[in-house]
Image (spheres, rainbow, N blue to C red):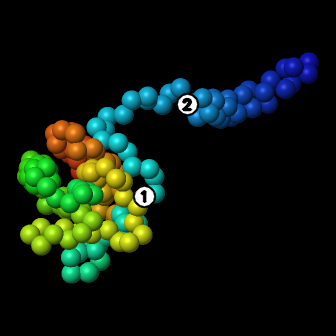
């Protein structure tokens, strides 16, 4: 028996066991199979950003703790003017448009200084928030997920939120 015929079963076993591993490694390292587009309308927050880093507290000084619901957070670095009231109304409509899932979502206003007529949260002294007003979406565990500039359409927030609520088993 020739050497090739003698080693043929060993070569077949090696090919069938190592072949899929080499194929998987080449697919993972090439990234050609990953989709280039995303279906979310907001911008993804950088991984690992926590709501707790903002050190939010209520007007009475009590720290803000996520209550197990998804949070829509309206950040207004220059206080609440008429645009702020309009956005609060829009966020209320987004919450109501969720129908039976609306109990899973809450919305909050974040202002640098408390305003007596508004129930808002304030960031802590060391918090680094952007200089532009934005709407943030955080999950029930306090992770920042998405953010939207105020020029965004509230329907985009609603579509993202519906998709996240359908996929999420928390909150």
- Mark 1, other Cα within 10 Å: few <14 / some 14–19 / many ≥20: some
In this picture, is 110 found above or below 116?
Answer: above
Q: For the residue labelled by badge 2, is the local secondary structure a helix, a strand or a loop?
A: loop
In this picture, is 166 found above or below 67?
Answer: above
Residue at 21% x, 81% y is: 60
In this picture, is 51 found above or below 38?
Answer: below
Residue at 42% x, 69% y is: 126
Q: Nearer the viewer, mark 2 or mark 1?
A: 1
Q: Of 165 and 54, which appears nearest the observer?
A: 54
Q: Position of residue 40 (x, y in %)?
A: 31, 38
Q: Of 54 and 69, which appears nearest the observer?
A: 54
Q: For the residue labelled by badge 1, is the local secondary structure a helix, a strand or a loop?
A: loop
- Mark 2, other Cα within 10 Å: few <14 / some 14–19 / many ≥20: few
Q: Position of residue 39 (x, y in %)?
A: 32, 34
Residue designated by label 1: 49
Spatial CA span between label 2 and label 1: 25 Å
Residue designated by label 2: 31
């Amino acid at each position: 028996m020739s050497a090739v015929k003698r080693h043929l079963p060993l070569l077949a076993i090696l090919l069938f066991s190592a072949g899929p591993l080499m194929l998987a490694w080449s697919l993972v390292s090439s990234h050609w199979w990953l989709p280039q587009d995303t279906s979310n309308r907001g911008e993804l927050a950088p991984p690992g950003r926590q709501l707790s880093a903002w050190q939010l507290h209520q007007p009475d000084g009590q720290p803000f703790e996520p209550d197990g619901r998804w949070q829509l957070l309206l950040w207004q670095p220059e206080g609440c003017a008429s645009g702020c009231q309009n956005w609060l109304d829009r966020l209320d409509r987004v919450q109501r448009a969720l129908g039976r899932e609306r109990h899973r979502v809450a919305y909050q206003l974040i202002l640098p200084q408390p305003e007596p007529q508004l129930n808002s949260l304030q960031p802590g002294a060391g918090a680094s928030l952007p200089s532009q007003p934005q709407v943030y979406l955080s999950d029930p565990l306090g992770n920042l997920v998405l953010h939207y500039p105020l020029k965004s359409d509230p329907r985009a927030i609603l579509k993202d939120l519906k998709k996240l609520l359908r996929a999420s088993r928390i909150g």
